[in-house]
Image (cartoon, grey):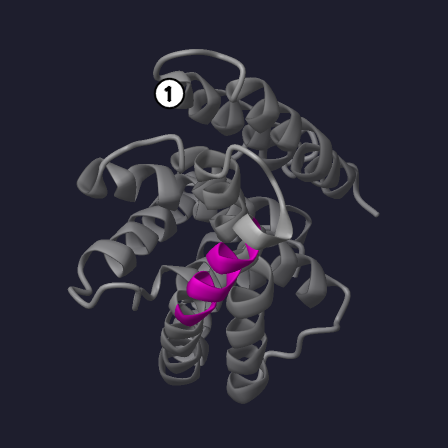
Amino acid sequence: MKKSNIAMLLVFFLAIPLTLFLGTKIPGRAYYITSTMIVIEMLIPFLMAFEGRRPQARELVVIAVMCALAVAARVAIPIPNFKAIFAIVIISGIAFGPESGFLVGAIGALSSNFFYGQGPYTPWQMLGYGAAGLLAGFLYQKKLLPRKPLVMAIFGFFTVLFFVGPILDTSSVFMKVPNLAWSTVLPFYISGFFINLSQAVCTFLTIILFGNPLLDKLDRIKQKYGMTEELHGV
């Protein structure tokens, strides 16, 4: 496993959860500090993915474009709880690796909240959205996620429904439930299931319709500009 992959796992499972926990102990608008710390933490494995070489500006521009596309996929669709951002994040992870996938998801969540409003939920959204790209990138690197539209769409559906969604539901539990008990926690997950289901359906449709065409275009960009396999993990 590459050093950047190991760093990504440490950031995801240790650094960010610790940051979220410490953020709950700071009074006031601590989510601004927490969000900034998460951005800094997730940049570490992303920069390590370059493995000591100098990245060209055009490589970073492509990642920035994917971040902007993720924001547009969330903001431009006017239907509540029916956003294509998760599909874009998953495609980014497949195309550029888990480090870039996580970065696109986290930055997409943070940036799109400038339209919806920042809040204590923002760091959790950065974690949840980034998790989709992280998982997709790892599974594709390990050849466990083939680039077939239906397979990727099914993966996106279940990832949003049973992985990303529960992470976001958990944020609601910690922010709104003073005393954790099944009687108080379970309603959040039940009500969140239908929201997650709607998001999962949108992710499924987006990937099955646009997944391969977008990946093909990204492949041509990588080939044209000589983006290395070491950076992108493909």
Q: Nearer the viewer, residue 163 or 60?
A: 163
- In the rendered image of this protein, does residue 66 appear above or below residue 60? below
Q: Nearer the viewer, residue 218 or 137?
A: 137
To which quarter of the image does residue 18 belong? top right
Say which residue appears at 15% left-offset and 64% top-offset.
78
Could you say where residue 51 lies in the image, as x and y percent from the top left?
70, 34
Start-end of magenta stretch: 185-194
- In the rendered image of this protein, does residue 20 appear above or below residue 229? above
**Can residue 56 be seen in this snapshot?**
no
> What residue is disc 1 on?
32
Quadrant of the image containing the C terminus: bottom right
Q: Nearer the viewer, residue 103 or 169?
A: 169
Would you call the spot at circle 1 few (<14 residues within 10 Å), some (14-19), or many (20 or more)? some
Amino acid type, label 1: Tyr
**Can residue 22 be seen in this snapshot?**
yes
Q: Viewed as shown, does residue 68 lie left or right of 13?
A: left
Membership of 154 in magenta stretch: no
To which quarter of the image does residue 132 belong? bottom right
- In the rendered image of this protein, does residue 4 appear above or below residue 196? above
Could you say where residue 121 lies in the image, as x and y percent from the top left?
40, 37
To which quarter of the image does residue 114 belong? top left
The secondary structure type at the circle numbered 1 is helix
Could you say where residue 66 lies in the image, as x and y percent from the top left?
37, 52
Q: Main secondary structure of the magenta part?
A: helix
Q: Nearer the viewer, residue 116 or 87?
A: 116
Say which residue appears at 21% left-offset and 54% top-offset.
75
Say which residue appears at 59% left-offset and 66% top-offset.
162
Could you say where residue 200 lies in the image, as x and y percent from the top left?
44, 72
Residue projecting furthest to the front: 183
Membership of 193 in magenta stretch: yes
